[in-house]
């Protein structure tokens, strides 16, 4: 039996520990797993902090993946809601429910199906994020700014910047005007560094295939009623799963699973 030490009880560390302890095949090597966490919280940057009876997420974390195995892994930890929650009923929301799934008003170990609503506050108005081609978007921008944004984007079709920074990565996909409006200050405030000082490769991981062309394609797919969930960009999804008590709840649940499995080796695995 090999001893494995994992640094950090975040999503990656906990999942790695779980997979190592879950080796059930006789021909596979068994592991003794110890996970070291310096804080009192489980979940890393996806944790939910408890303070004075309140639960606060550290950043917005939604549960969605194009990988079926990942989705099944999360669902096995926390089943999908089978009945409407209070706010679903109150607001008349319609959403796909899991047949036989738990009632979120009666059970706590449940994944809620949430409608995505993301907004950017700019020019004292709210814009959809990611940017959409709704009439409201153009009304908020105004005629002159819309024309400038359009020509700025058209320029990127013929003149591409060298993608040696996140700034150029965004400009190549949205044009300089839209970059300045929606991405430059937002990115700097969020990550503490100007986009010109952030790697373009890192940006590609964050926004993947999202661009004006992807937004236009998504618009026409919706206009003509075409849905292709397999190819939907992660940043353009409209629904996602969310644990009843915040993202940290799922990782706390996984931590308990890992501890329970680790007890087979009579050792505490979360230190």
Image (spheres, rainbow, N blue to C red):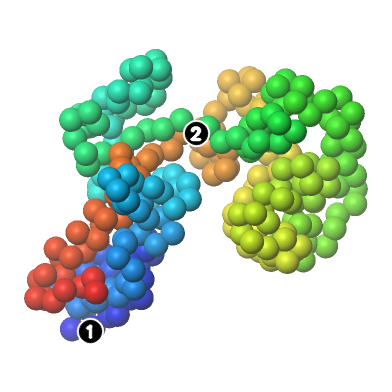
Label drawn at residue 2: 1
Q: Give the x, y percent position of residue 91.
A: 40, 17
Instruction: Say whether marks 1 and 2 touch (CB < 8 Å).
Output: no
Query: Residue sitting at 67 percent across and 31 percent down?
Result: 127
Residue 20 vertical position relative to residue 212 in the rendered view, above or below: below
Residue 201 visible (yes or no): yes
Label drawn at residue 116: 2
- Viewer-proximal residue among 79 and 58: 58
Secondary structure type for disc 2:
loop
Residue placed farthest to the front in the image?
Answer: 52
Within 10 angstroms of label 1, few (less than 14), some, or many (20 or more) residues? Answer: few
In which quadrant of the rendered image does the N terminus lie?
Answer: bottom left
- Nearer the N terminus, badge 1 or badge 2? 1
Residue 16 visible (yes or no): no
Residue 79 falls in which quadrant of the image? top left
Residue 210 falls in which quadrant of the image? top right
Within 10 angstroms of label 2, few (less than 14), some, or many (20 or more) residues? Answer: some
In which quadrant of the rendered image does the C terminus lie?
Answer: bottom left
Q: Give the x, y percent position of residue 186.
A: 67, 49
Query: Residue sitting at 34 percent across and 68 percent down?
Result: 39
Query: Residue sitting at 71 percent across and 36 percent down?
Result: 122
Residue 265 vertical position relative to residue 11 in the rendered view, above or below: below
Residue 269 falls in which quadrant of the image? bottom left
Query: Residue sitting at 79 percent across and 50 percent down?
Result: 171
Residue 218 horizontal side relative to residue 42, left or right: right
């Amino acid at each position: 039996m090999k001893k494995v030490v994992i640094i950090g009880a975040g999503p990656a560390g906990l999942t790695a520990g779980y997979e190592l302890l879950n080796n059930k095949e006789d021909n596979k090597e068994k592991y003794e797993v110890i996970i070291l966490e310096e804080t009192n919280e489980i979940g890393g940057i996806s944790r939910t902090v408890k303070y004075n009876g309140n639960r606060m997420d550290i950043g917005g974390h939604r549960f969605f993946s194009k990988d079926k195995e990942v989705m099944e892994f999360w669902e096995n930890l926390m089943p999908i809601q089978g009945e409407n929650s209070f706010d679903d009923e109150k607001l008349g929301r319609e959403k796909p429910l899991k047949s036989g799934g738990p009632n979120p008003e009666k059970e706590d170990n449940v994944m809620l199906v949430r409608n995505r609503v993301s907004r950017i506050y700019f020019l004292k108005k709210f814009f959809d994020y990611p940017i959409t081609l709704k009439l409201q978007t153009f009304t908020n921008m105004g005629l002159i700014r819309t024309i400038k944004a359009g020509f700025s984007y058209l320029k990127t079709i013929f003149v591409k910047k060298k993608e040696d920074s996140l700034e150029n990565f965004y400009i190549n996909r949205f044009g300089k005007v839209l970059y300045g409006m929606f991405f430059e200050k937002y990115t700097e405030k969020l990550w503490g560094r100007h986009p010109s000082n952030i790697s373009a490769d890192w940006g590609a991981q964050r926004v993947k295939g999202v661009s004006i062309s992807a937004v236009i394609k998504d618009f026409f797919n919706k206009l003509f009623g075409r849905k292709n969930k397999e190819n939907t960009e992660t940043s353009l999804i409209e629904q996602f799963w969310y644990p009843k008590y915040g993202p940290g709840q799922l990782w706390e649940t996984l931590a308990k699973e890992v501890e329970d499995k680790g007890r087979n080796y009579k050792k505490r695995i979360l230190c």
